[in-house]
Image (tube, coloured by chain):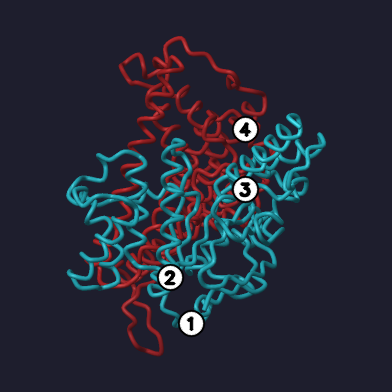
Chain colours: A cyan, B red
């Protein structure tokens, strides 16, 4: 049924000298099964927005309707809402508290009041999603590496079997190999499970490769919303918001400026490589003639 | 709820109180608290109340902020007030010829205690609103310095205090973040009996302790790598000075303090 946000506004510390407007007049429709990249500079309202989607924050004005449930309505089951919309915070490994990996992942399903058997099934399923072997079950999460801890934390949310998964900077602070691994797993998860995925990031590279739709936030409003190529072709506007198009699309536009006939809508390394190789081949062909 | 705690929140504006030497302010506050408790009689109470209001006006900090600082202690005031009302022996209060169990002496004592507690908080807030935590600990360190001759680690105490104050907002922020993350996993902090609620805190406290230890470790390494080795031979970027305004304040306060004592013991 998707998520629908209407005229959403939110002000932090309302009525105090430290008042700060975080969101103003946000309108969004998110359909089931979309893969959305949510990008924006620090303080653009991304985190405030996603906390509205599982009822951690309630709209001060406007409304948020998740799978037909209005989050401001009295008597709405917040536990159920938070099960449906799984939210993985930034640096989720900081929320780990149990003494074994298994117990920590089981925390969410346990709060849902499921049977032992059901919990067991879900924990193992979640572990396989994030690529943790069953031998990890009885290890202490505090002995694991940073990337492994993060995967435990993500599995903790996945074990609740949400229909929408929101990840806030899931790759932040990881080394390039760890980034690659996490993002690949998220991509695979999306393709296998048909969940709606919202990936929050300020790295264009990460988002460009895997998101089908991109929403750009700026100063608490939705500044752009559309397909990746449409967004990245507006590099100048992005730069004004403190964001950059992926480096590869900067390279492409520089090549075009220098007169190479290359497609302007290229924003992934793979496609850029193919296009440049093609150009090189044509050139070579022309020379030999 | 967590955001209501304003103690230790510096309000950066420009006022005569902000310019003062922290040592003057700390000493004045200490004796002010003593004055609040020895003041007696209507004149005595009026004197300490007016002096507190005078300090608040001088600080130029909006009264709204002072009022918010009082919020967490309303319950204590109410609680002690009710106890005093009913448990103080004396003349019973009759309402429509029924004994209410309250006494006139209790009523007066409850009123006095309420005024004292409110003034106590207001005066302390005046110090923390007008003095940044750094200059506050600087002042404490300087005041304790004479005692270091008898083995009191003045610098270390002040350093510990400033680190503790520095990390209060950080830990509050961290608590809120972790609590949200656990709520997103279906944790419930708000329902059930006391035992259930206490148990529900475990998923919050464990990560909080871990992160506090991690921060402490990081800070220790950062301090060591910048060659911190205790207070010996350390100088300050902005040393604190006892200025003319401090002298005037001290004089005015000594007269006020003397008057309060005189009122108490002469009459």
**Element marked by disc 3:** helix
Q: Which of disc 3 and disc 4 is earlier in sequence?
A: 3
The residue beneath circle 4 is: B249
The residue beneath circle 1 is: A74
Residue nearer the viewer, A204 or A21? A204
Q: Position of residue A111 (x, y in %)?
A: 29, 68
The span from disc 3 to disc 2 (Cα, nearest Å) is 55 Å
Q: Position of residue A45 (x, y in %)?
A: 61, 56
The span from disc 1 to disc 2 (Cα, nearest Å) is 23 Å
Q: Is residue A219 above or below residue A139?
A: below
The span from disc 4 to disc 3 (Cα, nearest Å) is 14 Å
Quadrant of the image occupied by residue B130: top right
Q: Residues within 10 Å of mark 4 (few under 14, many from 20)?
A: some
Given contact means CB atoms under 8 Å apart, are the residues at marks 1 and 4 in contact? no
Quadrant where the C terminus of chain A sits is: top right
Please say whether residue B265 is visible from this viewpoint.
no
Given contact means CB atoms under 8 Å apart, are the residues at marks 3 and 1 in contact? no
Farthest residue in the bottom direction? B96
**Element marked by disc 4:** helix
Which of label 1 and label 4 is nearer to you? 1
């Amino acid at each position: 049924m998707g998520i629908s946000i209407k005229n959403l506004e939110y002000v932090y510390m309302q009525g105090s000298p430290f008042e700060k407007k975080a969101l103003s007049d946000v309108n969004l429709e998110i359909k089931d099964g979309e893969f959305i990249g949510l990008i924006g500079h620090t303080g653009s309202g991304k985190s405030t927005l996603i906390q509205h989607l599982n009822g951690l924050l309630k709209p001060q004005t406007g409304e948020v309707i998740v799978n037909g449930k209005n989050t401001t309505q009295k008597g709405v089951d917040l536990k159920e809402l938070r099960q449906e919309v799984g939210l993985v915070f930034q640096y989720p490994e900081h929320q780990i508290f149990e003494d074994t990996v298994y117990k920590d992942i089981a925390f969410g399903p346990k709060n849902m009041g499921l049977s032992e058997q059901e919990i067991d099934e879900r924990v193992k399923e979640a572990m396989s999603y994030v690529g943790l072997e069953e031998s990890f079950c009885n290890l202490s999460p505090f002995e694991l590496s940073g990337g492994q801890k993060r995967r435990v934390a993500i599995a903790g949310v996945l074990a609740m079997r949400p229909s929408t998964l929101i990840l806030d900077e899931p790759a932040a602070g990881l080394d390039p190999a760890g980034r690659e691994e996490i993002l690949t797993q998220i991509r695979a998860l999306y393709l296998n499970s048909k969940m709606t995925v919202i990936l929050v990031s300020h790295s264009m590279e990460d988002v460009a490769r895997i998101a089908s739709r991109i929403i750009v936030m700026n100063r608490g409003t939705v500044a752009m919303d559309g397909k990746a190529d449409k967004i990245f072709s507006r590099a100048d506007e992005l730069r004004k918001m403190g964001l950059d198009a992926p480096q590869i699309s900067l390279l492409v536009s520089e090549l075009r400026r220098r007169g190479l006939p290359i497609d302007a809508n290229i924003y992934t390394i793979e496609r850029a490589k193919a296009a440049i190789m093609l150009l090189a081949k044509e050139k070579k062909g022309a020379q030999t003639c | 709820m967590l955001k209501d705690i304003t103690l230790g929140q510096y309000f950066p504006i420009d006022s005569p109180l902000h310019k003062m030497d922290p040592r003057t302010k700390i000493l004045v506050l200490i004796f002010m608290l003593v004055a609040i408790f020895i003041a007696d009689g209507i004149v005595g109470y009026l004197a300490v109340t007016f002096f507190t209001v005078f300090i608040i006006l001088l600080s130029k900090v909006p009264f709204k902020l002072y009022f918010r600082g009082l919020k967490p202690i309303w319950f204590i005031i109410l609680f002690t007030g009710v106890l005093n009302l009913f448990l103080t022996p004396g003349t019973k209060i009759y309402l429509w010829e029924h004994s209410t169990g309250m006494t006139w002496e209790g009523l007066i004592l409850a009123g006095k205690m309420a005024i004292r507690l409110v003034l106590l908080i207001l005066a302390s807030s005046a110090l923390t609103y007008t003095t940044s935590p750094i200059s506050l600990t600087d002042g404490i360190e300087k005041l304790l310095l004479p005692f270091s001759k008898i083995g009191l680690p003045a610098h270390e105490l002040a350093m510990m205090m400033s680190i503790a104050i520095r990390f209060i907002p950080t830990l509050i922020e961290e608590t809120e973040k972790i609590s949200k993350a656990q709520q997103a996993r279906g944790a419930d902090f708000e329902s059930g009996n006391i035992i259930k609620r206490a148990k529900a805190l475990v998923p919050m406290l464990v990560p909080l302790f871990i992160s506090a230890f991690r921060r402490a470790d990081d800070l220790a390494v950062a301090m060591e790598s910048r060659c911190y080795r205790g207070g010996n031979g350390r100088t300050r970027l902005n040393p604190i000075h006892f200025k003319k305004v401090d002298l005037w304040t001290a004089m005015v306060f000594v007269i006020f303090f003397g008057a309060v004592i005189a009122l108490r013991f002469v009459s």
